[in-house]
Image: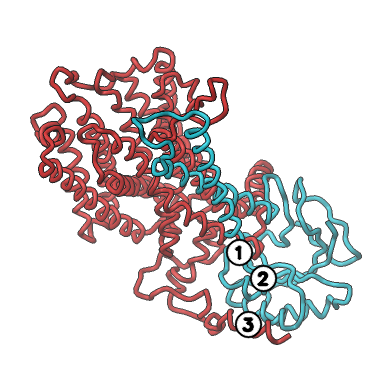
């Protein structure tokens, strides 16, 4: 069989409509070549406004110190670290789609991978803000890096999970960015070669690195993508594992749990896919990409949401069971009193988490609901609210009551500046996302062309005799003919 | 870089391109390159290109990262500033695994991408002549280099028989340059010169 072999006829097409290669180029690049719509401007300016509010909140925090936040004696980590873990988790879906699904040869990834990878990069960028500004004296943030210094040399503690985080997140950001940009190169070259305006020729000419589409370059590009996918796959698992180590390696009841790494990774994928759904349902509509990001894609991602949501549910129940079965009075108090007890100060947060993450995604067992855009969008928001509360429950309910009641803190509520910081990261995220959707192709043009004949609506039935011929046999024959 | 003469054949479909590549190779012409809008699996094999060894480079960068991390952490925590954590051994390998792993991945990825850019001679602002602007859109462009012995007219006629939708001759500079695409390339002689 040649490498152009066809996919199963049973699977519905991933590219609908009668598309040629040129149509794909035109459809996907249209928003870049046209002026942005009024809707785009409204969205973009709202995001910038939020970003400004965030910058203002953070500036106050830098000037007046972490006292601007309502942290207290035992609640040292609260909104800030909750938001950090939440954003990092969201990032994970992008790598899962682009790397793990590439290794598993899942062709539907091509419709959504570019936007999901962009989402990853912006989410990691937002996540990184929280630990950095939480340092208080942010101007010495570089002390976390190991470099020969005049203080001794005083090295960071390589045995600390917080330092592992520094390495994990910066590596994750770098590798995701490289992977994303390498994939973008051919598409930027496509825009460059179609460009009529001078600035566009210049910008995309510079950005496409002189990509020519040579077969040798494609061969290297494919090898590079595959190896980067192979590297990103354990990387993405390691990142959230290490984030969970921030908690799991401590001896705080409620954090000291061996189930954390897989449970955090599942939760991350869960919330990440929800964010991909929220973004893509809007993007496909506004940029008219319904033929590339089809209902099939939404359906498949909802299946992943119900799967990972259920894994997270099992993890919650396992935790509860172990808290009871383990017979450690502190552990069981943290779970059975501080969380499960609805009448305890934060009991409500636990039930929001359970309701949003475990119960509500179960509606996706029904095909009709998986393929309903309104339900999917609504659920994707619900899931992300639930996942935010998961991190809040883990962090705050574990620390707000110390071992002895004299150490029980007052009820923690965030200040406007903590909320402002969080809103500011939304501003940062959406500012980047709007710029991305205007200046970069939100669907991978070359990759869609690559799967068109395997998964395009009008190609699935035909196959020419030439394509059945083996290339390997020809190459072998040719080698020996001379 | 030297200016050479090329016969450029454009194909609308990769299904036509594959047999054409085979025919051209069997006829003994030298394929300069084939430019395609997307990766075409098997085309490199059909053209007789050898496999890339970029993964081997990636492996070497990876083990460099592993070694850097392990030796750096060992130096700081065992030799330069040993700290006593409750009498635990200074050589705490399990606690070093996360950073060692991260640096392995970081070195391998960054190294491979830089190697990729070096091998393909790609960098910001670099330009390359790729014969047809539509080769990044919807055309599959096969380019055959003319040697002094080549009969250009024969070659053009031959290309048409292989199923090319358009065949023409171009004088072009191989390699890369900095600047714009609209610069003038002097013609080798009076052949039809198409500048892109």
Left or right of A34 on screen, residue A279: left
Residue B84 x %, y %: 39, 29
**What mark, if any, has residue A370 been given in the picture?**
none
- Classify 10 Å Cα crowding around label 2: few (below 14), some (14-19), many (20 and above): few
Residue under label 1: A219
Residue A406 x %, y %: 15, 17
Task: Decide which of B173, B66 is in the foreground and name it.
Answer: B66
The relative height of residue A476 versus residue A384 in the rendered view (above or below) is below
Residue B132 x %, y %: 70, 62
Residue under label 2: B49
Farthest residue in the right direction?
B189
Quarter of the picture holding the C terminus of chain B: bottom right
Q: Residue at x 17, y 47 (%)?
A: A318
Q: Helix, strand or loop at disc 1?
A: helix
Residue A148 x %, y %: 57, 28
- Classify 10 Å Cα crowding around label 3: few (below 14), some (14-19), many (20 and above): few
Evaluate if marks 2 and 1 touch, with contact meaning CB atoms under 8 Å apart. Answer: yes
Circle nearer the N terminus (3, 1)? 1
Q: Kindly identify which chain the residue marked by label 1 belongs to.
A: A
User: In the rendered image, what is the letter of the chain coloured cyan?
Assistant: B
Evaluate if marks 3 and 1 touch, with contact meaning CB atoms under 8 Å apart. Answer: no
Residue under label 3: A476
């Amino acid at each position: 069989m040649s490498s152009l072999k066809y996919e199963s006829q049973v699977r519905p097409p991933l590219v609908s409509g009668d598309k040629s290669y040129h149509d794909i180029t035109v459809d996907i690049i249209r928003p870049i070549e046209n002026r942005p719509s009024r809707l785009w401007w409204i969205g973009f300016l709202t995001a910038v406004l939020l970003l400004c509010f965030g910058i203002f909140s953070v500036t106050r925090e830098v000037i007046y110190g972490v006292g601007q936040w309502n942290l207290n004696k035992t609640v040292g980590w609260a909104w800030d670290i909750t938001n950090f873990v939440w954003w990092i988790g969201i990032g994970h879906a992008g790598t899962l789609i682009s790397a793990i699904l590439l290794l598993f040869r899942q062709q539907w990834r091509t419709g959504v991978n570019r936007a999901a990878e962009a989402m990853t990069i912006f989410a990691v960028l937002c996540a990184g803000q929280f630990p950095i500004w939480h340092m208080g004296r942010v101007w010495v943030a570089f002390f976390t890096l190991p470099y020969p210094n005049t203080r001794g040399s005083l090295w960071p503690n390589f045995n600390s999970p917080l330092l592992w985080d520094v390495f994990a997140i910066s590596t994750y950001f770098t590798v995701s960015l490289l992977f994303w940009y390498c994939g973008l190169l051919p598409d930027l070259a496509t825009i460059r070669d179609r460009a009529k305006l001078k600035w566009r020729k210049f910008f995309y000419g510079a950005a496409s690195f002189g990509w020519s589409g040579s077969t040798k370059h494609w061969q290297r590009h494919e090898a590079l993508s595959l190896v980067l996918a192979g590297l990103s796959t354990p990387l993405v698992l390691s990142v959230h594992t290490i984030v969970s180590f921030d908690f799991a390696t401590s001896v705080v009841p409620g954090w000291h749990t061996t189930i954390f790494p897989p449970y955090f990774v599942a939760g991350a994928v869960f919330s990440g896919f929800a964010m991909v759904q929220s973004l893509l349902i809007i993007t496909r509509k506004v940029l008219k990409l319904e033929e590339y990001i089809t209902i099939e894609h939404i359906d498949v991602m909802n299946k992943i949401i119900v799967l990972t949501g259920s894994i997270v549910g099992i993890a919650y129940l396992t935790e509860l069971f172990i808290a009871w079965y383990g017979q450690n009075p502190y552990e069981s108090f943290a779970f059975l009193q501080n969380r499960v007890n609805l009448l305890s100060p934060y009991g409500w947060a636990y039930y929001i988490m359970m309701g949003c993450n475990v119960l509500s995604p179960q509606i996706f067992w029904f095909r009709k609901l998986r393929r309903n855009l309104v339900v999917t969008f609504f659920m994707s928001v619900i899931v992300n609210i639930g996942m935010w509360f998961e991190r809040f429950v883990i962090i705050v309910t574990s620390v707000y009551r110390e071992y002895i009641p004299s150490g029980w803190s007052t009820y923690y509520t965030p200040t406007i500046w903590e909320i402002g910081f969080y809103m500011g990261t939304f501003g940062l995220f959406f500012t980047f996302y709007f710029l991305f959707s205007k200046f970069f192709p939100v669907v991978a043009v070359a990759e869609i062309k690559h799967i068109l004949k395997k998964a395009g609506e009008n190609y699935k039935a035909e196959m020419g005799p030439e394509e059945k011929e083996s290339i390997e046999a020809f190459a072998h024959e040719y080698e020996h003919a001379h | 870089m030297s200016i050479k003469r090329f016969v450029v054949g454009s194909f609308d479909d990769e299904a036509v391109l594959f047999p054409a590549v085979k025919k051209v190779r069997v006829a003994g012409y030298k394929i300069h390159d084939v430019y395609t809008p997307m990766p075409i699996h098997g085309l490199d094999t059909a053209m007789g290109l050898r496999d890339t060894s970029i993964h081997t480079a990636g492996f070497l960068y990876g083990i460099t990262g592993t070694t850097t991390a392990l030796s750096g952490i060992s130096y700081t925590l065992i030799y330069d500033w040993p700290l006593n954590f409750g009498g635990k051994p200074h050589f705490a390998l399990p606690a070093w695994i996360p950073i060692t792993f991260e640096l392995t991945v970081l070195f391998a990825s960054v190294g491979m991408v830089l190697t990729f850019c070096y091998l393909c001679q790609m960098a910001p602002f670099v330009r390359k002549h790729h014969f047809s602007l539509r080769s990044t859109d919807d055309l599959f462009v096969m380019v055959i280099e003319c040697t002094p012995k080549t009969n250009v007219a024969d070659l053009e006629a031959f290309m048409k028989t292989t199923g090319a939708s358009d065949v023409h001759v171009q004088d072009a500079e191989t390699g890369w340059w900095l600047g714009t695409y609209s610069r003038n390339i002097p013609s080798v002689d009076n052949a039809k010169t198409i500048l892109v």
